[in-house]
Image (spheres, helix red, strand yellow):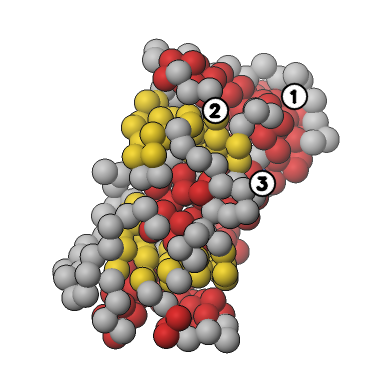
Amino acid sequence: MILALETSCDETAAALITDEGEIAANVIASQADLHARYGGVVPEVASRRHLELVVPVLRETLGERSLDDVERVAVTRGPGLIGALLVGVQVAKALAWSRKLPLVPVDHLHGHVASLFLLPDPVEPPFLCLLASGGHTLLLDVRGHSEFDVVGTTLDDAAGEAFDKGARLLGLGYPGGAAIDRLARDGDPEAFAFPVARVSGLDFSFSGLKTALLYTVRDLGEAEAEGRRADLAASYQRAIVRALVERTRDAASKTGRDRIAVVGGVAANSELRAALPEASAAPLPLCTDNAAMIGSAARFVEAVPYPHYLGLDAYASAR
Ligand code: KG4
Ligand code: ZN
């Protein structure tokens, strides 16, 4: 059994995963409500909250089991908020060290991809993967369970960030992706023509879209914008989804992959899932941050033997 920890942003999460990729336990304590009043994640607040939540989350994850059942400890090493990551890394080191267990450092992005390798419906590489989250928008040529090349990325905002910034402009609170998704169901996606920048190659750009929404809301005026919120949400979502779908299909044909998958928080979006019916996607709770995906990735990463991981550091930026 692998005990996995994830604390890279505002979810304190732990999971137990078998070597076959079965989820034995999966616990997520979201801090979203805590950060909502600030309109976004406050790094120092997140670190402190991880400290408070990590032991209760671990206890709930183990349940009737004990650390005797754990053979390896896995943890997200980066990228993410450095203070938040350090809580998970230190706790994982302490747990592993106390039992003389090996430690598996996992890259968060590899974790999102590995959300597809869990039972009962594992997706086997190779495939072309769209990873769209609050921090990243990547097109990945996934060649193996732990081998992938970046073939496209965003030049500015991530897709999830575009959702969150749009939600903020529409007064929907933080994080706003799921709120836009819900509101868009009652709106007309053709009501407003929001442009999506066409950049060369397989890259994305979302910052102009957010500005277009800002100007549209300003031109409509407060009352009118309020009354047409569903149309605005639907049209804005349509523009993001269209860009993601176009580029993902382009990337699949350029890399010669005949299968497509979507992962990350934005993969929970209902319009995106409907617009890419041929794509594999993880179950909804495994799209947003969780530790099951970290345990899943750990199956394909070399463990660091006891006690050589004590000097291991977290990293904030993608590598
Ligand atoms: O993967 P994730 O939990 O965290 C990161 O690694 O960033 O992704 C969070 C992002 C947020 O930007 C959130 O607004 C977005 O995923 N998101 C959605 C939906 N659910 C979450 N965006 C669009 N539609 C959704 N249903
Ligand atoms: Zn994530």
Q: Earlier in the sequence, mark 2 or mark 1?
A: 1
Residue drawn at x 28%, y 63% is: 303
**Which of the image's four quarters has the N terminus?**
bottom left
x, y percent for residue 152: 39, 26
Looking at the rendered structure, the kind of residue marked 2 is Arg
Front one among 165 and 80: 80
Residue drawn at x 70%, y 38% is: 270
- Up-down: is 43 above or below 246? below
x, y percent for residue 219: 66, 23
Q: Is residue 91 left or right of residue 114?
A: left
Residue drawn at x 35%, y 31% is: 150
For disc 3, does the CB lie below 8 Å from ligand 1?
yes
Crowding at dot 2, Cα within 10 Å, few <14 / some 14-19 / many 20+, comes out as some
Asked which secondary structure carries label 1, the reply is: loop
Asked which secondary structure carries label 2, the reply is: loop
Q: Which residue is mark 3?
A: 178
* Gap between marks 1 and 3 measured at Cα: 16 Å
- Up-down: is 131 above or below 42? above
For disc 1, does the CB lie below 8 Å from ligand 1?
no
Q: Earlier in the sequence, mark 1 or mark 3?
A: 3
Which of discs 2 and 1 lies nearer the camera? The answer is 2
Q: Quadrant of residue 171?
A: top right
- CB under 8 Å between discs 1 and 3: no
Q: Which residue is mark 1?
A: 189
Q: Is residue 88 left or right of residue 290?
A: left
**Which of the image's four quarters has the C terminus?**
top left
Q: Earlier in the sequence, mark 3 or mark 2?
A: 3
Q: Which residue is mark 2?
A: 259
Q: Can residue 158 be seen in this snapshot?
A: no
Looking at the rendered structure, the kind of residue marked 3 is Ala
